């Protein structure tokens, strides 16, 4: 049985930012990195990655440059910009706050009320 | 700011690198799929072909993500716009006749719109180009019941200067012409502003050298001083830095130059010389004295309305009662610029504002015309549009495509039109020499924007309206029309529009053709006398001296005597106006001897020296020339040939003895001679020369006389300077204004008519082409509608001629109606212009023939196409 779950809306951008924050990656590398850091738990429609990458690039959160991949092929590499790093910090903090809050809410028992 | 830069970069990327970005995206996605396929083959052992298939499945719809990618890249709409624009350009090339016709019409319409916007905008400028220029106002008395202003306001001015609290620096000026006699330059009449020192406070412009005028200069008895402008300093005084303190002779008195104003300073109108205004109100009675223009600056915080209210309450009491009645005039305050553009009436200003916007609406009329043509094109593309709709394009998307296609055409027209307007304005600016200094006829950013806005609105009319109509029906049902032919009817609205367009063309063309014909005539026919032998000059004396008849007489006689001694001069004479440019007056005849058309005729009138006709070598056709017995008080007059033929409708001999009087006078005059028309400058279309009356006069009878000199050979170089030198020797106060060879007058007229002919020609061609294109569209539609019928009738053995008559009979009838209506309207135009029936009829007939010819040529293409169509193919077409 497939354990992976669909992405929550809006989280793909955050995951991409995180992935490229760990090192410069091409588009396919971003996918692999996300799968790696999420333990393959999240199901991503692969093609959806690209509109998201272009959107982030347009917002100035990531930057791109054409280069050569490990397989000696021409590929476009993405890296986090300074603005992107700041945004990632904010978004991550916000996400953690929400996750903590929801986690706390879900852990609450009747006795604790 | 950073976002702005990013946005600009994104637009730049989309505009310049759209294709490249698409290719990059494609390559990036291909790389992704290849990597995934290789991984699947390597890690999961899937066969390469299957791995590739699975990789595509996992990626999802490539095209869909490409679309999303383009959208995410931003400005996706711009990408669509560019695509549509490219398609639009392709359509322009494909339908090049439509492009030519539409482009030309749009060019002309937008050029006219932009020019009107610029010229009227300039005239309505409320502010002078000074600091606080918007607060500079004019104060004047206007007649309460119309009839203009009364500018003899010296008394009121003195009162306003002291008592009106809402105004500051109240001043006045009058424009005078004086002879300037500077060392090493010939005497020359120049415009001088006699002005109060407050003008310089209002302009807030310090002198470039020396000082400007001061209140102390205005005192009676103060030393005579003058301030000169930058241009005058540069041109007349070689930009001499030591000019201040030097003397120049003005109006016969030496004036000391006390300052030079900086470049660009030309207040109040277009002046380069300023003298103090020295007037003592005590010397004049109320409403007497020289005409003055009063100006002032609104005090900070005060409005024109407040100043107006204050004047209304105090103004009337401070000025003495007007001789024409206490309520004859009322004081007004208005922007200074309006006063000098003769725009005192606020209603007139509003009308001009409306005109400023509405002249541009001409381009909408053109747009509606083009919409008819585009509708014809759009309808032939219904199949294509239906396919796009079936593939998911919204109606809005299709309309935007049609809009952008139309915009490519109107934008082309706008660019060409703005260039044309710019060139025409340059031409106007050259002719508008002496216009107020704040008026610059050049294409401003506002006019360019206006022209572009016209193009956008025209594109909406041209593209969206036919698009709405064409896509309004159930478009999906039209997939069957993919073969490009359509059973859609043109519709009565569009047919009416085409017919109306033909009517407009038929109405406008005869007048335009008539004007053009007149210009051709002007170019071909020369004057009836040797104009190159004559030089004319206005002889002016000061206003005060002009009232002294004996002074004028003695100066004119002395001047003519001296001029006769000049080398090459064979004769000198004088008249009240330059020959060919008399003063128009209405005349009436005694009793039953009314002119043929029953209207009071308008004739050109001259007072001339008794030897003028002889000097000009004019042929006497009947009767006699003037001689010594004819004086200003005699009743003998001489008329020209046109007077006899056009006004009296008789040959020259029969005109002798006829009597008439001026509509404003009581004395009767008798025709004692008839002379040939001279100098034969065609003034208006419809008449080679004006009916003209010559009355005898002696020196001193009027002021200012125009002196004519006849030379035996070529006119010497620098004639104006020489003659002015002679004038100054006779009397330093004598001004010889506008010394020019008579041939220059003829050239000016020709040049003016040539400009009119160019404008008329361009408009005529665009109107003719537009209506030809409309007729072509109508014919094409008729064919498209009846292709099946053609097939059947052709299969049944119908003769081509019968077939054509049947096909085009209705369309031709419609066009005939248009022609008829237009011709009738044209008759009205000619009648209003006072042009005779005979030339008008000839012109109407010519134009109607040309239009019919154009209609036939326009119909020829569709007709030949229809007859060439094989019957079987025609039958296949859905009827």
Image (cartoon, rainbow, N blue to C red):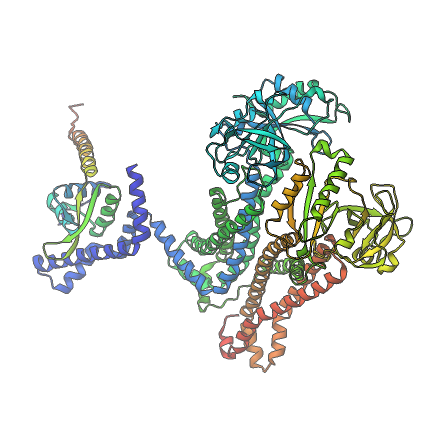
- Residue B4 location (% of width, % of height): 31, 39
Asked if residue B400 lies left or right of residue A67, the reply is right
Q: Residue B138 appears in which quarter of the rendering?
A: top right
Kindly tell me whether residue B296 is visible in this rendering.
yes
Asked if residue B494 lies left or right of residue B262, the reply is right
Asked if residue B557 lies left or right of residue B368, the reply is right
- Quarter holding the N terminus of chain B is top left
Taking B653 as reference, is B198 above or below it? above
Q: Residue lying farthest bottom?
A: B797
Q: Nearer the viewer, residue B203 or A81?
A: B203
Kindly tell me whether residue B360 is visible in this rendering.
no
Q: Nearer the viewer, residue B651 or B168?
A: B651
- Residue B721 location (% of width, % of height): 61, 45
Q: Nearer the viewer, residue B249 or B830?
A: B249
- Residue B694 location (% of width, % of height): 80, 49
Q: Nearer the viewer, residue B574 or B839?
A: B574
- Residue B708 location (% of width, % of height): 71, 49
Q: How many marks?
A: 0
Q: Residue lying farthest right?
A: B591
Taking B29 as reference, is B183 above or below it? above
């Amino acid at each position: 049985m497939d354990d992976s779950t669909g992405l929550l809306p809006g989280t793909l951008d955050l995951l991409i930012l995180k992935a490229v924050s760990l090192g410069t990656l091409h588009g396919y590398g971003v996918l692999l990195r996300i799968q790696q850091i999420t333990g393959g738990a999240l199901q991503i429609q692969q093609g959806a990655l690209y509109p998201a990458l272009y959107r982030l690039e347009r917002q100035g959160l990531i930057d791109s440059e054409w280069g050569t991949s490990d397989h000696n092929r021409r590929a476009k590499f993405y890296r986090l910009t300074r603005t992107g790093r700041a945004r990632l910090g904010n978004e991550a903090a916000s996400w953690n706050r929400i996750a903590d809050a929801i986690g706390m809410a879900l852990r609450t028992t009747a006795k604790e009320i | 700011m950073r976002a702005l830069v990013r946005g600009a970069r994104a637009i730049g990327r989309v505009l310049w690198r759209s294709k490249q970005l698409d290719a990059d995206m494609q390559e990036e996605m291909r790389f992704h799929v290849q990597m995934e396929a290789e991984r699947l083959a390597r890690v999961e052992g899937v066969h390469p072909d299957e791995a590739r298939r699975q990789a595509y499945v996992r990626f999802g719809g490539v095209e869909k993500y490409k679309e999303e990618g383009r959208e995410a890249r931003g400005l996706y709409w711009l990408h669509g716009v560019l695509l549509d624009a490219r398609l639009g350009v392709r359509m322009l090339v494909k339908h090049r006749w439509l492009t030519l016709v539409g482009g030309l019409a749009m060019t002309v319409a937008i050029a006219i719109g932009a020019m009107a916007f610029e010229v009227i905008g300039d005239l309505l400028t409320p502010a002078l180009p000074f600091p606080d220029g918007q607060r500079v106002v004019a104060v004047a008395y206007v007649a309460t019941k119309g009839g203009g202003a009364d500018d003899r306001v010296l008394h009121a001015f003195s009162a306003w200067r002291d008592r009106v609290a809402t105004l500051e620096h109240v001043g006045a000026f009058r424009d005078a012409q004086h002879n300037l006699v500077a060392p090493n330059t010939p005497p020359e009449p120049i415009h001088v502003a006699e002005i109060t020192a407050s003008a310089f406070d209002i302009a807030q412009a310090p002198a470039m050298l020396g000082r400007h005028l001061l209140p102390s200069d205005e005192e009676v008895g103060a030393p005579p001083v003058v301030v000169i402008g930058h241009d005058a300093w540069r041109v007349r005084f070689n930009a001499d830095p030591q000019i201040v303190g030097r003397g120049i002779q003005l109006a016969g008195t030496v004036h000391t130059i006390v300052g030079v104003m900086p470049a660009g300073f030309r207040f109040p109108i277009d002046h380069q010389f300023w003298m103090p205004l020295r007037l003592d109100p005590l010397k004049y009675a109320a409403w007497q004295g020289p005409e003055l223009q009063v100006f002032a600056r609104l005090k900070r915080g005060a409005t024109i309305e407040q100043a107006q209210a204050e004047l209304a309450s105090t103004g009337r009491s401070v000025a003495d009662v007007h001789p024409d009645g206490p309520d004859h005039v009322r004081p007004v305050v208005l922007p200074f610029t309006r006063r000098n553009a003769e725009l005192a009436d606020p209603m007139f200003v509003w009308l001009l504002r409306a005109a400023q916007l509405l002249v541009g609406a001409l381009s909408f009329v053109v747009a509606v015309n083009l919409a008819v043509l585009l509708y014809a094109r759009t309808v032939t593309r219904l199949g294509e549009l239906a396919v796009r709709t079936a593939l998911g394009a919204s109606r809005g998307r299709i309309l935007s495509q049609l809009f952008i296609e139309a915009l490519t055409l109107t934008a082309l027209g706008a660019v060409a039109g703005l260039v044309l307007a710019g060139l025409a304005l340059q031409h106007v600016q050259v002719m508008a020499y002496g216009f107020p200094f704040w008026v610059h006829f050049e294409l401003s950013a506002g006019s360019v924007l206006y022209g572009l806005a016209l193009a956008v609105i025209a594109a909406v009319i041209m593209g969206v309206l036919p698009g709405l109509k064409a896509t309004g029906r159930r478009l999906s049902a039209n997939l069957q029309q993919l073969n490009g032919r359509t059973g859609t009817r043109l519709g009565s609205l569009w047919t009416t529009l085409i017919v109306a367009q033909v009517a407009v063309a038929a109405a406008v063309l005869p007048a335009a053709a008539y004007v053009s014909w007149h210009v051709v005539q002007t170019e071909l026919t020369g004057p009836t006398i040797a104009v190159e032998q004559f030089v004319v000059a206005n002889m002016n004396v000061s206003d005060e001296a002009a009232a002294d008849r004996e002074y004028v007489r003695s100066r004119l006689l002395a001047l003519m005597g001296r001029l006769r001694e000049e080398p090459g001069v064979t004769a000198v004479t004088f008249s009240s106006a330059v020959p060919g440019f008399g003063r128009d007056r209405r005349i009436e005849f005694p009793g039953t001897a009314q002119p043929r058309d029953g209207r009071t005729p308008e004739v050109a009138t001259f007072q001339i020296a008794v030897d003028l006709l002889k000097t000009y070598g004019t042929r006497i056709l009947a009767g006699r020339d003037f001689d010594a017995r004819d004086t200003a008080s005699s009743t003998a007059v001489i008329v020209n040939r046109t007077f006899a033929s056009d006004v009296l409708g008789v040959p020259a001999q029969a005109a002798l003895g006829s009597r008439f009087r001026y509509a404003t006078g009581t004395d009767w005059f008798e025709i004692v001679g008839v002379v040939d028309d001279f100098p034969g400058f065609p003034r208006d279309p419809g008449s080679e020369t004006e009916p003209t009356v010559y009355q005898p006069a002696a020196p001193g009878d009027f002021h200012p006389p125009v002196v004519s000199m006849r030379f035996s050979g070529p006119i010497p170089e620098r004639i104006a300077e020489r003659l002015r030198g002679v004038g100054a020797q006779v009397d330093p106060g004598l001004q010889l204004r506008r010394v020019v060879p008579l041939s220059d007058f003829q050239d000016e007229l020709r040049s003016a008519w040539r400009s009119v002919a160019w404008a008329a020609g361009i408009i005529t061609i665009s109107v003719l082409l537009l209506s030809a294109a409309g007729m072509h569209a109508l014919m094409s539609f008729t064919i498209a509608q009846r292709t099946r019928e053609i097939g059947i009738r052709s299969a049944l053995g119908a003769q081509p001629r019968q077939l054509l008559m049947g096909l085009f009979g209705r369309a031709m009838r419609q066009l005939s109606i248009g022609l008829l209506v237009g011709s009738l309207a044209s008759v009205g135009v000619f009648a209003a212009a006072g042009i005779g029936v005979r030339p008008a009829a000839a012109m109407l007939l010519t134009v109607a023939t040309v239009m019919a010819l154009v209609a036939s040529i326009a119909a020829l293409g569709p007709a030949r196409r229809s007859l060439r169509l094989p019957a079987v193919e025609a039958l296949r077409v859905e009827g």
